[in-house]
Amino acid sequence: MSRRVLRLEIPVFPERLMFRVLDPEADREAPGPPMPPVDTLIKASRDQLLVSCAQEQLGVHLTIEEWDGAPPPFSDGYEDEAKCVLYLRGQLAVGVGSSARPVQWLRLSGGVGDYGVRVYTRNRTAAVESYHELFEQHSDPLSDDFQQARKELEGLEQYLLQLWRES
């Protein structure tokens, strides 16, 4: 039975409708990086993963879990799932944009090697709809009421990234 060994929750602010999960030592400019995901949740290369977001006006909520073995699949209200394998050198970074520095990194207990990865998402459609409704309710996006209502939508779009060392 697999058990979770690490859980980290962070806000991420997507750029160009995506964020990046990668080995911090990965060369983001090297030939062969993944193409941006179009009509799919993720695109991956050997040591980089691009995750598609439904919008970029609001921050999204990302939960990262490391497991000591493959976790049991589940839905728990998540709407979409994607899988891949990443080669990681014992660390993981989350960043945005092609030239941006990682915004958060962590050390993995599994060390260096191939990691199975599952990405789940929920509230993608609800976040986009809620943001559009915000403009219908408030005509001035610079008003305090608009800004307060916008803050309440931060983190509505959620992602769960589970990873484990492949044997």
Image: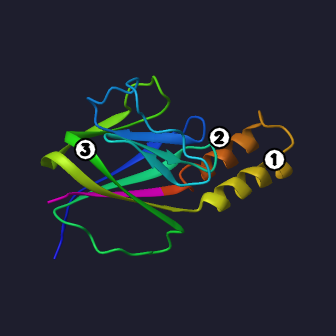
Say left or right for 160 vs 87.
Answer: right
Which residue is under mark 1? Answer: 135
Asked whether, in this view, residue 18 is left or right of residue 167, the answer is: right
Q: Is residue 160 magenta?
A: yes
Quarter location, residue 33: top left
Q: Where residue 33 is drawn, which disc sits there?
A: none
Q: Nearer the viewer, residue 78 or 147?
A: 78
Please, what is the three-letter code of the amino acid marked with disc 2? Gln
Q: Amino acid at mark 3?
A: Tyr
Mark 2 or 3: the one toward you:
3
In-image side of 81 versus 16 (left or right): left
The earlier-in-sequence mark between 1 and 3 is: 3
Within 10 Å of disc 1 (Cα), the crowding (few <14, some 14-19, many 20+) is few
Residue type marked 1: Phe
In which quadrant is the N terminus drawn?
A: bottom left
Q: Residue at label 3?
A: 87
Give the mark, 2 or 3, whose residue is nearer the N terminus: 2
Viewed as shown, does residue 95 lie left or right of 6? right
Do the residues bearing badges 2 and 1 touch, measured as CB atoms within 8 Å?
A: no
Q: Residues within 10 Å of mark 2 (few under 14, many from 20)?
A: some
User: For numbered disc 3, what is the local secondary structure?
Assistant: strand
Give the labeled residue for mark 2: 57
Q: Which residues are magenta?
A: 159-167
**135, above or below 80, in the image:** above
Distance of label 1 from label 3 (alpha carbons): 42 Å
